[in-house]
Structures are given as C-alpha cells and as structure tokens.
Amino acid sequence: MKKGFFLVLEGCEGSGKTTVGQWLFEQLTASGEKVFYTREPGGKESPVAEKIRTIILDTQNNVLPLTEAYLFAASRAQHVEEVIKPHLAKKEIVICDRFVYSSYAYQGGGRQLGLETIKRLNALAVGDLQPNLVLLFDLDPALGLERKRSHRQDFDRLDQEDLLFHQRVRNAYLELAKENNTLFKIVDAQKPLAEVEATALNYLKNKLKEANYALKDSSY
Ligand code: Z5A
C-alpha cells in the first residue's frame, strides 16, 4: 500500500517539467522533506530500466511502434517494483518525471496505437499504483521543440518525430487531463519560469494537504 506521496510530471518536449521538477525537489528538500526524484523511461537506481531506456531512445535502432510500447512498459514494470514502491513505502515524496501517461500520449496518441491498447499493455506494469497528483506542463509543441533545439544538439528517436506527431501527443494529454480532472492539474508552461514554478508548487501544496501527508514542516 502507498504510504508516501507520488507526484508525476508530464508534458511535451521542452515544456519545462524537468526544470520545474528539480526546483520542486530543491524546495521540498530545503524544508526538510524526504524527497526522491526519478524519471522514465529508465529510472534512478534501476540499471535494468536504464538499459531498456538506451535501446528505446537510440536513433540507430529501428524500433517498431508496438515493440516501443512494450519496451516502455517493461522498463516501467522494473522501475515501479524496484524503485517507486520501495521509496513510497518509506513515506517519501516521490517525484517522477514522466510515467504511464507518457505512454498513453506518445504511443497511444502520437504513434496512434490507441489509448485502450496502451492501457491494457501497461496494466500489469503499473498494477494498483496511482499518483496523488499529475502536473501536466502544457505548451505548443512548436515552441517546446524550439526551446529544446536552442539548448541541445542531441536528439533522441522520439524528439526526431515531426510536429504533427507532437501535436497528437499534446491533444492526447489534454484529453487525459479532461477525463481525469481531479488527478491532473494543467500548468500553462508558456508563462515565465518563475510563474510556472509558483503554480506547480501551489498545486502540490494543496494536494499534499488534501492527502493528509505528514509534512516535516507543517507551515509549508
Ligand atoms: N516517452 C514515451 O514516448 N513514452 C513513455 O512512456 C515515456 C517516454 C516514459 C524521453 O526523453 C522520451 O521518451 C520523450 C518521451 C518519450 N521523448 N520525446 N520526444 P527524455 O527523458 O530524454 O526527455 P524528456 O522527458 O522528453 O524531456 P524534455 O522534453 O527534453 O524536456 P522538459 O523536461 O520538458 O523540459 P526542460 O528540460 O525542463 O526545459 C527545456 C528548456 O526550456 C530548458 O533549457 C529550460 O531552461 C527551458 N525552459 C523551461 N521552462 C521555461 C519557461 N517557462 N520559459 C522559458 N524557457 C523555459
């Protein structure tokens, strides 16, 4: 059973979720909370999941859509059991940069394998693990790709997809958020970074309270 607090960050390329996630990690850690930061595909403390990540993202690999979906799910199955659940059992706040909703949006929407197929394929990998909160950093993919290109030279297999693919991903995310509006909170990622961070922190604080999570610093 989950005892900690499970926060998931989702969004299209360059939406800023990693930047904001790291900032949230620092804020919480500075106020004395025990926080664990990880990401998918792969995951901190999971060599097997990391090996699967390299297969998925390698631009030299011709990975077919269904194979790709299984690889993401396989990496997740390892990450959930080996990393996420044990940290939650220690009552920590787990921040996960991408989770199963990325598969719903990228493989279900982007690759057009369909949401139901991807849900079925991930059911065993995720089991009964449910996040307390999903922050969706929403941004026009054209802008996100531009942000990414201005800061990085290396692009993985999925980054290299065309704009239409990324627009399908965004639409799938927005549809998920609409259907699960108590779990998802949408953050406008086009706003200046300080504003995005403040909005994300505010949503997180409210959910921590709602979940009766025992914060070390009760004034937080
Ligand atoms: N994938 C999948 O298909 N299915 C799955 O199930 C899973 C993943 C789990 C993983 O790539 C790829 O796998 C990903 C989805 C797919 N692929 N694509 N395409 P990754 O792990 O290497 O990286 P990522 O998760 O895609 O991260 P990202 O999109 O590259 O970045 P981000 O976390 O969204 O953004 P960032 O790095 O925090 O920010 C990007 C830049 O923008 C950076 O220079 C910031 O300083 C800047 N930034 C951030 N916020 C702002 C604001 N508000 N204003 C201006 N500039 C900003």
Image: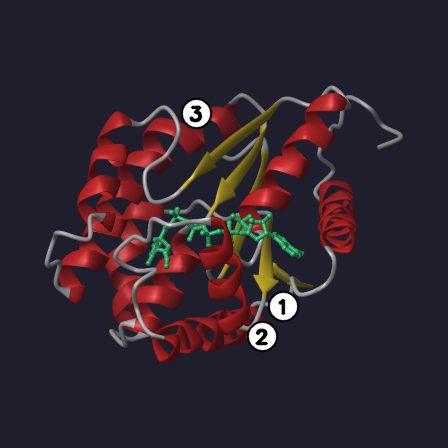
Asked which secondary structure carries label 3, the reply is: helix
What residue lies at 63% left-to-right and 45% top-to-bottom?
20
Q: Is residue 147 left or right of residue 201?
A: left
Label 1: how many Cα within 10 Å (few below 14, some 14–19, many 20+): few
What residue lies at 25% left-to-right and 69% top-to-bottom?
117
Task: Give the percent coordinates (x, y) of residue 110.
Answer: 33, 72
What residue lies at 33% left-to-right and 44% top-to-bottom?
41
Q: CA distance from mark 2 to mark 1?
A: 5 Å
Q: Mark number for residue 178?
A: 2
Work out whether residue 176 or residue 1 is closer to the camera in this orientation and state it. Answer: 176
Q: Is residue 147 left or right of residue 186?
A: left
When the figure is inspected, residue 17 is found, relative to residue 54, above or below; the finding is below
- The reply to whether discs 2 and 1 touch (Cβ–Cβ < 8 Å) is yes
Q: Residue at label 3?
A: 86
Q: CA distance from mark 1 to mark 3?
A: 28 Å
Task: Give the percent coordinates (x, y) of residue 160.
Answer: 30, 63
What residue lies at 54% left-to-right and 45% top-to-bottom?
18
Q: Mark number for residue 181?
A: 1
Label 3: how many Cα within 10 Å (few below 14, some 14–19, many 20+): some
Q: Quadrant of residue 116?
A: bottom left
Q: Is residue 21 left or right of residue 74?
A: right
Query: Which residue type does callout 2 highlight?
Result: Lys
N-terminal-most mark, 1 or 3: 3
Query: Which residue type does callout 1 highlight?
Result: Asn
Query: Which residue type does callout 3 highlight?
Result: Pro
Quadrant where the C terminus sits is: top right
